[in-house]
Image: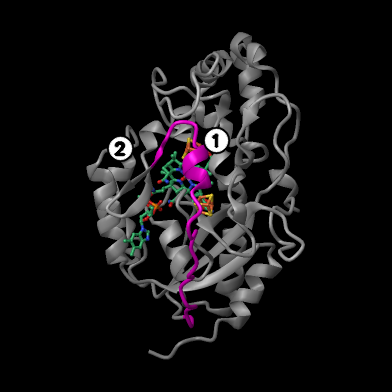
Amino acid sequence: MALVDSAQVKQQALDLGFTNVGIAPAVALLPAREAYRQWLKQDFHGEMAYLAEHEELKTTPTNLLPSAKSAIVVSLNYFQEPQATVKVARYALGRDYHKELRGRLRQFETLLKTEHPDAEFRACVDSAPILERSYALMAGIGWFGKNTMLIDSKRGSWFFLGVLLTSIPFQPDDPSNGGCGTCQKCIEACPTGAIVQLDNRWQIDARSCISYQTIEKKGELDVDTHGWLFGCDVCQEVCPFNEQRASQPMRAETTTNEGFLKQRQFPSLQQIIDMDYETWDELTRGSAIRRAGYEGLKRNARAALKPSRGQHDG
Ligand code: B12
Ligand code: SF4
Ligand code: SF4
């Protein structure tokens, strides 16, 4: 199979505003499949049943697009300073990233279709059953930190990922290599001890992770959420790869994507607790925060008002 040079397609992705782009071959990722299976076996996914349902699909892109030959992986920077009134993870301060990324990937697809009319495509952002970070590793976008974030040595980890599967056999990039060395800052800083070592790898026990608790968990919360209303940024805030340095100007650079910037000050926790449905509807429209639901956001606000019991108290 003759490979298609990928310089042009990568430039097109950057011209569309993506922060970085790389190409992975669309092959089944067998080592990652085993790691994913082990993670599920520990029940680390908690109540996220869809993750278990996707087990077989996740590492085999040809299940999503039978003609797939390449996975074009893109990243999009969302860094900005945090919210002043309440603790909301930065990724959720602006417009819902699913919409933003999907829109851009669709534009990308339309562009490529004009040049390759017989080619097939499938855009994946988050909800499609694909291991985005593992393909991003293969595509040279970054490597797995101990906090399990995909880290780009030059840019840090404040970015989203998206994947465009295609039948075009583009020349792939080399996988990333990099590592945390002896650093353990995120493990020490995680307020709930959710970063655990198993099978010689650092993994997230989502059940203890504040992000899972405040976004995905139904019913009552079962860990102290340490004041976070929605999501959690602690393991990225402490990461040296997110530190600005004169030698690394691309790190922690505020996003130029208007849609991601926070649109308004959030109400206080007490105002959220007292909020009627219409106000909640208005506050969360088009935002990732909507995922917590009306009752869920109030539950999170009540928990965030409670004094924390200290570090690593689960
Ligand atoms: C479920 C999910 C969560 C869960 C579970 C998180 C987790 N660490 O698994 C919860 C709700 C807790 C969560 C939280 C967050 N998430 Co999230 N999440 C996802 C989702 C939908 C699936 C991830 C998944 O399958 N996890 C299961 C684990 C087992 O898979 P994994 O981490 O991808 O990879 C593991 C294995 O595959 C294995 N592995 C991979 N390759 C290889 C190779 C070999 C050889 C071996 C042995 C093993 C191996 O090691 C990895 C670590 O255990 C992805 C989108 C997607 N479709 O991929 C977004 C995604 C990972 N999340 C994202 C973000 C931004 C977040 C938050 C920062 C949001 C926030 N501020 O609150 C936090 C970060 C918490 C953290 N430290 O991970 C981004 C990450 C971008 C990046 N730079 O890494 C993604 C990619 C969404 C996106 N489209 O941009 N998330
Ligand atoms: S997102 Fe927060 S709770 Fe989850 S692993 Fe990172 S620091 Fe721990
Ligand atoms: S804080 Fe340290 S250990 Fe954690 S991901 Fe960053 S470099 Fe790795």
Q: Residue at x 28, y 64 (%)?
A: 31
Residue 208: x %, y % from top left: 39, 32
Q: Is residue 247 left or right of residue 295?
A: right
Q: What amino acid is found at the position of numbered circle 2 in the picture?
A: Ala
- Which residue corresponds to mark 1? 232
Observer able to see residue 117: yes
Residue 86: x %, y % from top left: 66, 25
Q: Quadrant of residue 301?
A: top right
Which residues make up the magenta segment? 170-195
Q: Tag 2: Cα neighbours inside 10 Å, few (<14), some, or many (≥20)?
A: few
Q: Residue at x 49, y 37 (%)?
A: 190
Observer able to see residue 121: no
Which numbered disc, 2 or 1, marks the residue that appears first in the sequence?
A: 2
Does ligand 2 reach within 8 Å of label 1's beta carbon?
yes
Classify 135 as above or below 91: below
Residue 291: x %, y % from top left: 51, 31
